[in-house]
Amino acid sequence: MYLIRHSFTVIVFFLLSAEVVFAQGSRLQPIPNVYLDCTSCDVNYIRTNITFVNYVRDQDDASIYLRINDQRTAGGGREFILIFSELRVQDARSDTLRYVSSSTDSHDERRIGLNRFIKIGLVPFVSNTVAINSLNVIYDEPADRDPDEDEIDDPWDNWVFDVDVRSNMWGQEGEFNFGLYSGFEAERTTHTWKIRSRVRGEIRRRNVELTDRT
């Protein structure tokens, strides 16, 4: 009677997969309903000049609650506190903006300035709605801006790369196992489209020592 020992290696599998995803963005939501709570505002002027949202008279019908408080400043101007609150959604958004008008501003200049801040505050709340398709951003460059100021240069051209490598080992008497897992992901996002490419691999190695008795 004698013993014969066998040692062999089993490669379980090696897998590579690649995926490319193009996206135009998630489905846009309807135009939101705004409940405006401001006793001193020119409500008709706001509704007439800010038309990328709907206005409702009942707070229960609103998806955005806008509260505007105002008070006179020490310099004779007006300070407006704009509180934007999202209603009836999980992880509701809430923002606060502050607008201060000059003591020399006319009534028309003051309401134009207030409307500008209302528009700015509403943009984050409509960015995932159909209203975004009709909005434009206009930037008035300050006259004192340095013309030699360098623009931001992105050498990666909006590409983001992620590399993941993991391994593990385990075993017991007469058996040894080894696993290697790796992945590579490249993603590029612009305001109009998104591309994502993934490559994933996995190797498992198993050494087993068998004892034959004859």
Image: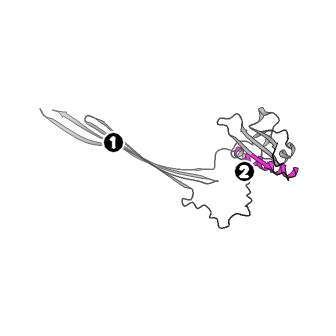
Identify which residue is drawn at 81% across, 42% down: 70
Q: Quadrant of the C terminus?
A: top left
Which residue occupies the foreground of this view, 11 or 88? Answer: 88
Q: Is 173 placed left or right of 200 in the picture?
A: left
- Report x, y in % for residue 46: 83, 45
- Report x, y in % for residue 119: 76, 48
Which residue occupies the foreground of this view, 85 or 126? Answer: 85
SS assignment at label 2:
helix
- Report x, y in % for residue 102: 82, 52
Q: Which mark is residue 156?
A: none
Residue range highlighted in magenta: 98-125
Give, as a three-letter code, the residue at label 2.
Asn
Work out whether 125 lies above or below 193: above
| Magenta-colored stretch includes residue 121 | yes
| Magenta-colored stretch includes residue 102 | yes
Give, as a three-letter code, the residue at label 1.
Phe
Outermost residue toward the left in this view: 1
Q: Which mark is residue 133?
A: 2
Spatial CA span between label 1 and label 2:
53 Å
Identify which residue is drawn at 87% across, 52% down: 106
Question: Could you classify mark 1 by the number of other residues whose Cα lies within 10 Å: few (under 14), some (14-19), or many (20 or more)?
Answer: some
Instruction: Kindly indicate the quadrant of the structure image that contains residue 210.
Output: top left
Question: Could you classify mark 2 by the number of other residues whose Cα lies within 10 Å: few (under 14), some (14-19), or many (20 or more)?
Answer: few
Q: Of the two numbered discs 1 and 2 on the same chain, state the one appearing first in sequence.
A: 2
Identify which residue is drawn at 83% across, 35% down: 57
Magenta segment's dominant SS is: helix
Work out whether 7 lies above or below 137: above
Outermost residue toward the front in this view: 74
SS assignment at label 1:
strand
Q: Is 189 placed left or right of 119 in the picture?
A: left
Residue hosting label 1: 178
